[in-house]
Amino acid sequence: MKECDLPARFPGVTIHESCYIDDPVEIGDGTNIWHFSHILARVRIGRNCILGQNVMVGPDVAVGNRCKLQNNVSIYPGVTLEDGVFCGPSCVFTNVINPRAEIERKDEFRATNVGHGATIGANATIVCGRDLGRYCFIAAGAVITRSVADYALMVGNPARRIGWMSKAGGRLKEDLICPIDGSRYRLVAPDKLEPAV
């Protein structure tokens, strides 16, 4: 797609002239896509997203509204980002468990769903086929080898849960009250947290 065609094709969207946008692609109003990024075919990006420099998305990927993909993030087929997901710089999603350069395994891609409001820290690795729960928090450099519960705080390699995070991004103490907005949570099982209503 020629750069001169982009403003007419995506009104209300800011796309740097160094980007490549393939056909067909849907991009929501208010989204900003910065330098050297590439959006491949059949990608749907929601409203008010920010894609940093050198971001690659697709093909066949859905990105929700208000997502932030920092520099050097690639979102491959099989990955779905729900609304409000933060992907820190250079975080990595895999698409097969046991890749080899000489063996094509595109029919073995495994789906990875990243829940609403999840945060993935810089240089974290998400092994394919593992789902990330709503508002979970993956620490920088963590390696996710199993699915993650809603609100879980995960660190290390392989990552383990060391606590809980609130929707507002505050680390919860034993009283399970958010230090940022005062919202309350409750444990309903050893590995299941939910807002207290």
Image: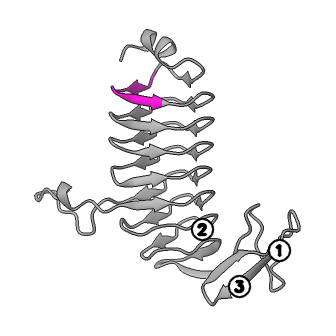
- Horizontally, is 176 left or right of 142 in the view? right
* Among the 4 quarters of the image, the one containing residue 94: bottom left
Cα distance between the residues tagged 2 and 3: 22 Å
Q: Secondary structure at mark 3?
A: strand
Image quarter where the C terminus lies is bottom right
Asked if residue 110 is positioned above or below residue 89 in the image, the reply reads below
Q: Amino acid at mark 1?
A: Arg
Query: Which contiguous range is marked in magenta?
Result: 18-26
At mark 2, the secondary structure is: loop
Classify residue 133 by image quadrant. Answer: bottom right
Residue 62: percent from the left, percent from the top? 44, 45
- Left or right: 64 in relation to 193: left
The nearer-to-camera label among 2 and 3 is 3
Identify residue type, mark 3: Leu
**Mark 3 = which residue?**
187
Placement of 177 over or under 16, stated as above or below? below
Can you identify the residue that label 2 sits on? 139
Residue 12 in the image: state x and y as whole percent.
Answer: 60, 20
CA separation, marks 1 and 3? 11 Å
Estimate how packed mark 3 is, as few (under 14), some (14 to 19) or many (20 or more) residues with alpha carbons within 10 Å: few
| Residue under numbered circle 1 | 184
Asked which quadrant contains residue 58, the reply is: top left
Badge 1 vs badge 3, beta-carbon distance below 8 Å: no
Q: Position of residue 189 (x, y in %)?
A: 63, 89
List the single residue furthest toward the left. Answer: 102
Foreground residue, 5 or 125?
Answer: 5
Please, is residue 188 above or below residue 121 in the view? Answer: below
Residue 144 visible in this rendered orientation of the protein? yes
Q: Position of residue 158 (x, y in %)?
A: 46, 79
Q: Is residue 97 magenta?
A: no
Q: Which circle's residue, 2 or 3, is located before the other in the chain?
A: 2
Q: Residue 53 — which label?
A: none
